Image (cartoon, rainbow, N blue to C red):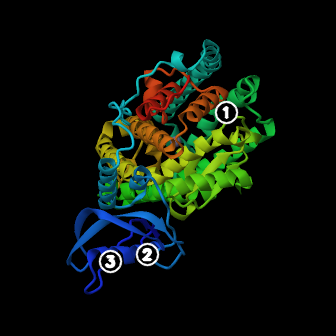
Amino acid sequence: MHRPRYDDWSLPKGKLESGESWEDGARREVEEESGSTGVLGPQLATTTYTDRKGRAKEVRWFELRSPQGDFVANHEVDEVVWLSPEAARRRVTRPSDAEVIHALDEHLEQAEPIVTAPAPTPRVPSLWWRVPNTPDDWFSPDELDRARRYRKPVGRARLLRMAISTVALLVIVFAEVAPKLVDALAISNWVLQLIVIVLLLELVSTVISTPFDAWLELRHDREWELSTQTERGFAADLAKGLVLGLVVNVVLLLPLVWVIRTTPTWWLWGWLVMVTFTIGLGFLYPVLIAPIFNTFTPLEDEDMNGRVDRIADIAGVRISGTYVADESKRSRRDNAYVAGLGATRRVVLFDTLLEHPPEVVEQVVAHEIGHWRLKHLRKQLPMIALLLLALFAGLKGFSEWTWIFEQAGVVTSGDIPYVGQPTALPLLVLAAQVGFGLLGLLTAWVSRAFERQADIEALDLLEQPQTMLDMQRGLHTKNLADLEPGLVKRLQASHPPAAERMALTSAWAASKGVPVSR
Ligand SMILES: [Zn+2]
């Protein structure tokens, strides 16, 4: 049952009245809280705990058979559900309640054996490591070939873009472009210097990436019928991205450079600024930033809404909103994600995804609700905070390497360290690329584990491995995803590749003894 005061799922229990037997107390509490009466079975388990006032408490648990009666929501309990022992064990909030259900399960098995013990089942592989797989097992030669032909020019163009931007950044740093620019403009105020240099870096990166993006969105993806982007839409996205990049960078860098210039323990304060910024962005992204590029409307399809509610109900989570993003104006690719923290948390479905049969969409929704239920967004925050601390410690070490700052033409005076000069920004961006590259590998590794876990959660919730396989095949081939990524790409990817997810699904099916076809 669900108790609104604690927002938890638990089993009925309560205090004995004076002179009351354990059995009578159990019957009365169950009836008061869940409205059910029934035949009391044997005692299953005894648990002990210490209450908030430090008093030792003992709880005796009983089996109750043939329950009858109607539940009426009240201030103590607002929902009662009947679940199989396995589902109930997953649902309850406290591990001690799960143990009681386990005891019931064992008792049921001993009392009335319904099925003979099955042979040891194959285990679902570990979440943390790659699940062995062969793309040939899951995709036809045609599908693999098509993905290869689409991917090859994209990979080459990406490499070219990366090479050009690295060279451009090296030139900006060692040709002392930033110091020369602020000199030429005769700007002595550090805030203005910072804004000018952020603008310079933004413009250079836009000039380099625009031809690539234009080729991809307006030509290559159109030829492969993936893009629906118009020249006008492309230009609008570009302008919005430029302004947004400038605003977000200035909002982050102004306080960051300020603490560097003000305190000797800047790396600790700077880390705090960075963590606050990251959490703030987590809250604001779905309500402030994502709506700049897409329109989000609450999911109106009644059938689909019912399906989402049903999945949320099985998972025991409360959905604060499912939104549809108008991505079809730009692309035919399907996607869905959970975004936001606290009150801004929501499930977002691309309108392109809703073109699939509802059973396929359900699989995607179950995966996203899996992320939600397992609190993946919130769990990532402490890890990111720790990694950022390592990054700032690295930055502190780097800041003492005066030679490199002198090579970059950074001049400083007084107590202000080199890193506190806005003219050092291009050099820091260059150094941060190495740092962020390493951090990215770690966060991607954790993210892939979370994706495997969300897939398993979706399978546990809906128990439809065949539909899951069809969804994985359908979405990855339609989106022309990389079906055979190499080692480097696999290590950088936030999701395991399609064949691996399908191998995981089939391992799950095998562990439950459910047959699936490829
Ligand atoms: Zn996911």
* Front in this rendered view, residue 422 or 357: 357
Three-letter code, disc 2: Glu
Picture disc at residue 31: 2
SS class, disc 1: helix
Three-letter code, disc 1: Thr
Q: At 43% across and 44% down in the image, what residue appears?
A: 424
Mark 1 or 2: the one toward you: 2
How far apart, in angstroms, are the residues tagged by discs 1 and 3?
75 Å
**Nearest to N terminus: mark 3 or mark 2:** 3
| Label 3 crowd bin: few (<14), some (14–19), many (20+), radius 10 Å | few
Mark 1 or 3: the one toward you: 3
Q: Reply above or below: 32 against 492.
A: below
Q: Quadrant of the N terminus?
A: bottom left
Residue annotated with mark 1: 210
Q: Is residue 189 visible?
A: no
How far apart, in angstroms, are the residues tagged by discs 1 and 2?
68 Å
* Front in this rendered view, residue 252 or 481: 481
x, y (%) of residue 342?
51, 62
**Nearest to N terminus: mark 1 or mark 2:** 2
Q: At 53% across and 15% down in the image, what residue appears?
A: 136
Q: Is residue 105 visible?
A: yes
SS class, disc 2: helix
Q: Reply above or below: 377 against 72.
A: above
| Label 2 crowd bin: few (<14), some (14–19), many (20+), radius 10 Å | some
Mark 3 or 2: the one toward you: 3
Three-letter code, disc 3: Asp
* Front in this rendered view, residue 384 or 275: 384
